[in-house]
């Protein structure tokens, strides 16, 4: 029994004198006397302990696992709630800095429907009243709510938001596809009576009447890219105004105030040709190598170019930003409207070619 007591740590080394006395020994002592000595037993036990050195490693692994579980619990029950408590306001603020693209798309669709409707000069007050609800307060109506001219009547409907892109924290560009039905004079006298007074109260929607002596022309789908920005904590159409385009909604940053008048003169000489080719989709000779533009399909025809500006730079090495105002005619119809485009061009000293074309980058109005 002494040997087992020593193994269990209740006694220290050395054998007991009684362990070797005759028949008075206990069964445990008798069993041990037939094998190795007590010292041999301790030596074997010590050797076995050394062989089981991995036991210590398992203890460490168990302790590490327990520590990790405790730390995970502290993180989940203490750190996360505190971080949410003190960082919640910052998270909410960051989420609010991105434009709501669904809301911007709804606004662009409503604006595009009123923008592409036209009832003749006598109905311009009604059209302007309808457009006013969509645009930057106080913006120049000749830019953001540019009106049509001509004798035809246009009715727009069925707007479809085709693409959208956030621009910075407060702006967006939205592509809207709209069906436009044109009506043209069919002989006889044209009505010259003034239209009804603009509606008051509820938000007006502009649907021009069609005179009895007009007939329907071909209906077309027009793709309009609408720049959206923020003013007085609400979404509005930016003052740069929309453009017709079949290409990316990614806006083009204009030339700014640092412009090159000589380069603008060279671009003006070829700008009408560039837009005519873009309008028909014949892009082979007006695009830079590696540039992929879709172009339009002949629904519109450019008739005039004005207000050409080009950013200062090196003609044949730099990509130059430009802005150009185009007078569009709805093909085959007596209806005209002006729009201002942003362009990125190359080879301005020889034959300018397009790298990109689209709506100008919307900016937040000062003080808004």
Image (spheres, helix red, strand yellow):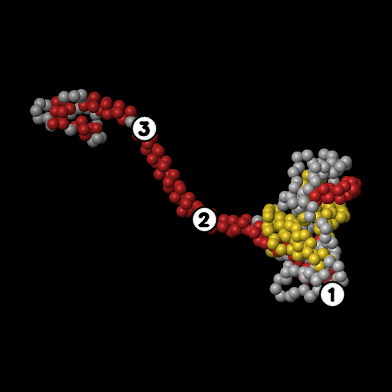
Contact check, label 3 and label 1, Cβ < 8 Å:
no
Residue, disc 3: 54
Q: Position of residue 262 (x, y in %)?
A: 90, 46
In percent of the image, x 24 and y 32: which residue is there? 7
The quarter of the picture where the N terminus appears is top left
Relative to residue 164, is residue 354 drawn left or right? right
The image position of residue 191, as x and y in percent, is 85, 72
The structure residue drawn at horizontal position 25% and vertical position 35%, both measured from the top left corner, is 9
Write the residue at 79% across / 55% down: 299
**In the image shown, does 183 or 6 lie closer to the viewer?**
183
Of callouts 2 and 3, which one flags the residue occurring earlier in the amino acid sequence?
Answer: 3
Q: Which residue is label 1 attached to?
A: 193
Total labels: the figure holds: 3
Q: Is residue 95 in sight in this rendering?
A: yes
User: Viewer-proximal residue, 168 or 50?
Assistant: 168
* Residue 242, horizontal then vertical, whole percent: 77, 58
Q: Nearer the viewer, mark 2 or mark 1?
A: 1
Q: Earlier in the sequence, mark 2 or mark 1?
A: 2
Secondary structure state at the residue bearing disc 2: helix
Dividing the picture into quadrants, the one containing residue 198 is bottom right
Mark 3 or mark 1: which is in front?
1
Per the image, label 3 sits on a secondary structure element best described as helix
Q: Viewed as shown, does residue 273 lie left or right of 9?
A: right
């Amino acid at each position: 029994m002494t040997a087992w007591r020593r193994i269990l740590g209740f006694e220290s080394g050395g054998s007991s004198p009684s362990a070797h006395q005759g028949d008075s020994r206990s069964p445990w002592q008798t069993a041990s006397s037939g094998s190795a000595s007590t010292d041999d037993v301790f030596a074997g036990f010590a050797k076995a302990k050394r062989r089981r050195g991995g036991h210590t490693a398992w203890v460490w692994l168990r302790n590490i696992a327990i520590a990790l579980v405790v730390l995970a619990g502290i993180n989940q029950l203490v750190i996360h709630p505190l971080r949410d408590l003190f960082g919640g306001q910052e998270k909410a603020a960051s989420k609010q800095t991105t434009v709501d693209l669904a809301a911007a798309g709804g606004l662009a669709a409503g604006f595009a429907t009123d923008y592409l409707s036209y009832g003749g000069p006598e109905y311009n007050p009604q059209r302007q009243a309808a457009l006013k609800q969509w645009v930057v307060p106080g913006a120049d109506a000749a830019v953001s709510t540019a009106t049509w001219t001509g004798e035809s009547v246009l009715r727009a409907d069925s707007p479809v938001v085709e693409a959208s892109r956030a621009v910075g924290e407060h702006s967006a560009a939205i592509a809207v596809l709209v069906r436009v039905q044109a009506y043209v004079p069919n002989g006889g006298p044209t009505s010259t009576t003034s239209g009804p007074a603009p509606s008051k109260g509820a938000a007006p929607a502009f649907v021009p009447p069609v005179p009895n002596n007009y007939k329907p022309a071909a209906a077309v789908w027009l793709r309009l890219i609408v720049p959206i920005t923020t003013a007085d904590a609400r979404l509005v159409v930016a003052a740069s105004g929309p453009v017709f385009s079949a290409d990316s909604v990614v806006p083009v940053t204009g030339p700014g105030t640092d412009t090159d008048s000589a380069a603008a003169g060279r671009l003006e000489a070829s700008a009408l040709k560039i837009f005519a080719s873009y309008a028909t989709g014949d892009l082979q000779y007006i695009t830079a190598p590696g540039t992929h533009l879709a172009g339009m399909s002949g629904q519109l025809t450019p008739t005039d170019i004005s207000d050409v500006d080009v950013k200062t730079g090196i003609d044949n090495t730099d990509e130059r930003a430009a802005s150009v105002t185009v007078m569009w005619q709805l093909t085959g119809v007596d209806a005209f409207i002006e729009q201002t485009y942003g362009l990125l061009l190359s080879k301005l000293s020889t034959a300018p070619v397009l790298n990109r074309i689209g709506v100008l980058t919307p900016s937040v109005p000062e003080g808004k």
